[in-house]
Image (cartoon, rainbow, N blue to C red):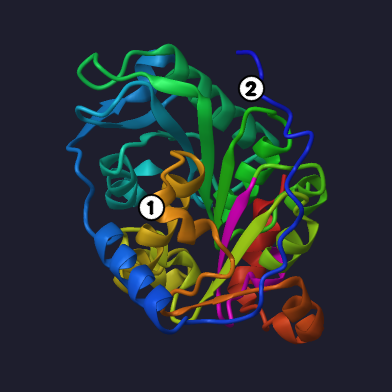
Amino acid sequence: MGAKCSHADPAPRHRPCAGGDTVGPVAIKTKELLETLSRRGPHGVDTGDLGFTGTPGTVFVPRDASSPAPLVGFAHDWTKAPRHYVDTLKHLASWGFVVVAPATDTSVRPHHQHYADHLSAAVEDALQATLGRGAVRADARRIGLVGHGLGGGVGALLASQRTDIDAVAMLFPTETVPAAADRAVTIDAPALLLSASGGVHAEDARALHLAWRGPIVHRRMAKAIEPGLVEGAPLLKYVGLADPDHRTQRTVRPLLAGYLLATLAGDDAYAAFADPDAGFKGAVTVTDEMLDEEGDDLVPSTPPLLKLVKGLTGS
């Protein structure tokens, strides 16, 4: 597929004022927008097996959406799969996005660059297919990447390799090999970065924030749990591999959908979600200056089991 653009002339990096909730009419507007996007969107969702295109995985297609529809490639966290994010991915699709989620690289020792290649292949597969009930195609001019945990870093790796990525969302990202932060200095696409207050992977988020060349909106969630976006699998939390948290899911979904609607779909009604100066309840906008001031104090102690896990994930 031909590249859409190279983002050769990125907008200046915006350095917002630090802050949390806004006040007055703006606060009322963002509250209403959050409430709207907390609910499913106007489209029903058809779910299909991506495997018929050659890449194992799942595709979520907005029913009766205008075609072509913006495309989102989703990368799961370490040892997870698309089935652990079904409600979140259906939520995005209900707001008009074709979402493709490869079910590759689920082992305890994935090769991170290969994972990025598989995500890219899934995006290409979706672009070539007629989706859903045959009425929707994915738009090659509007491609976004979303990743959770390890998938957040993998999404950054892929964004550094493709010139047609229009938006990137990294949800509680973790380190990759090669380092996503090292690649971020080449990426001009706009990005949403969500991190958790006191999170184990705060330093990984910090490194990506400071290295990202394009405009970035970094919101630190006050009550989010980094692995909480994973759905189901409650037994895994006892060995530190997953901790499903409905509050995290309810908080992340509208912020993510709003950002993609603003940047990828170009819907001005949701422009606040891509504005670092806009405040949202339960989130603080993180600035370069804040990260510089926090320095080493930002990095929490890592539990021994997680140290072992992180040691296994590099490849």
Q: Number of labelled discs?
A: 2
**Which SS class for mark 2?**
loop
Give the residue displayed 74% in from the left and 29% down from the top: 6
Image coordinates for residue 154, horizontal then vertical, percent: 63, 44
Q: Is residue 8 above or below residue 253?
A: above
Tell which of 110 and 49 is nearer to you. 49
Of marks 2 and 1, the one in the foreground: 1
Instruction: Please say whether residue 105 is visible from this viewpoint.
Output: no
Which residue is under mark 1? 269
Indicate left or right for 87 with 308 as reference: left
Indicate left or right for 49 with 106 as reference: left
Tell which of 1 and 226 is nearer to you. 1
N-terminal-most mark, 2 or 1? 2
Instruction: Judge whether residue 259 is colored magenta.
Output: no
Image coordinates for residue 203, horizontal then vertical, percent: 71, 71
Which residue is under mark 2? 4
Q: Amino acid at mark 1?
A: Ala
Q: Amino acid at mark 2?
A: Lys
Give the magenta-colored segment's residue range. Answer: 190-204
Q: Is residue 109 above or below residue 26?
A: above
User: CB of mark 2 within 8 Å of CB of mark 1?
Assistant: no
Give the residue displayed 33% in from the left and 66% down from the top: 34
**Which SS class for mark 1?**
helix
Q: Indicate the quadrant containing the C terminus: top left, top right, bottom left or bottom right.
A: top right
Q: Is residue 116 above or below residue 90?
A: above
